[in-house]
Image: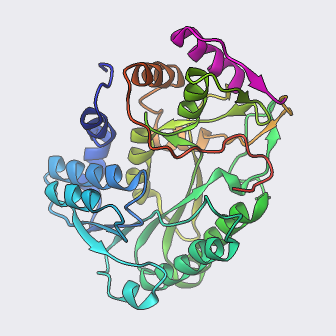
Amino acid sequence: MKPIETETQLEDELSTPSAADIEAMRTLPGDILILGAGGKMGPSLAHLARRASDQAGTRRRVIAVSRFSQPDVRAELGRSGVETIECDLLDSEQILRLPLCENLLYMAGRKFGSTGRPDVTWASNTLMPAFAARRFSSSRVVVFSTGNVYPLVPVSSAGSVETDSPDPVGEYAQSCLGRERIFEYYSREHGMKALLFRLNYAMDLRYGVLVDIARRVHDGQPVPLTVGHFNIIWQADANSYALRSLALCQSPPIALNVTGPEIIPVRRAAMFFAERFGREATFEGEESGFALLANAARCLSLLGPPGMTAQQLMENVAHWILAGGASLNKPTHFEVSDGKF
């Protein structure tokens, strides 16, 4: 892949379907509804679903639902053939007016700001899912969740696996487990086929753990080591896994850790960027020996390896920053170990 130079090229890369994506859309019946489609991942996932369906020759509606606080996002989705609906997902009456679809990608939720308004976080991460699960109990549902439902684990381990008991730290993570439990309830009680998509640090070149580390090094700021290791996955790969996970939904729901296979030391990543930028990497804090790590062996077995390795991601991030590429200015707070976001 050529170095990514512009946001137009980046958006194209994030939504270019693979052969596996196209085949999945050829065999999947029904329309696709994406709830919470206005965030960092939603637009590119909607574009991917539209492009893969078109290339498969499958006639289906792809519908993106959000409050759409950024009108240009909605306009761009419309130009690509994705239908859009403005909706406040905390309003149960508005959810009842949404069209029923066989396939639902549930992306809605709240993380940052959770410490200041935990009530809003809990409402967003448990009440909204209850409204949606009641409305779409006959759909296949891929429920976006997070590796934060697991505790921090020893770096010497291979990461948490899906059969490990959840032990979330902090109210944000607890509310995310609440979201999972709501969908699990509707799956078990009403037969809704679902998959709990436990995503751990998706990124593109404008946001993500590697971007946070790289920009700190580039700007001469110390890199925190408190949580000294992490997993990542290229957003295009996460999009592909999400789309293809619709075929894996079942009742009771299956959980799936979604991330790359590598465990990356923060210190090593910082030193890589220091070399690329010709700058010195400085650090603060000390590694605790524990980190939020997920073992994605089940995902890789079911859906295949990601298309971009951690090394390729680091190379692309370095090139993007040196070229003056844009930032979303949405730090991941990967260094947080007490669950307070």
Measuring from the top left, give residue 212's x and y in whole percent.
58, 34
Q: Residue at x 79, y 45 (%)?
A: 152
Q: Quadrant of residue 43?
A: bottom left
Measuring from the top left, give residue 243's x and y in whole percent.
38, 53
Location of residue 229 with respect to 339 vertically, above or below: above
Towards the viewer: 237 or 10: 10
Location of residue 85 with respect to 160 vertically, above or below: below
Measuring from the top left, give residue 208's x and y in whole percent.
53, 39
Q: Residue furthest front?
A: 220
Measuring from the top left, give residue 187's x and y in whole percent.
55, 76
Quarter of the image with the N terminus in it = top left
Towards the viewer: 221 or 171: 221
The residues colored magenta run: 266-285
Towards the viewer: 71 or 298: 71
Q: Horizontally, is 196 left or right of 79 in the view?
A: right
Q: Residue at x 43, y 51 (%)?
A: 40
Q: Residue at x 43, y 41 (%)?
A: 235
Asked which colour scheme the image uses, the reply is rainbow
Q: Horizontally, is 288 left or right of 56 in the view?
A: right
Q: Main secondary structure of the magenta part?
A: helix
Magenta region includes residue 131:
no
Location of residue 229 with respect to 181 vertically, above or below: above
Q: Horizontally, is 275 left or right of 305 in the view?
A: right
Q: Horizontally, is 204 left or right of 215 in the view?
A: left
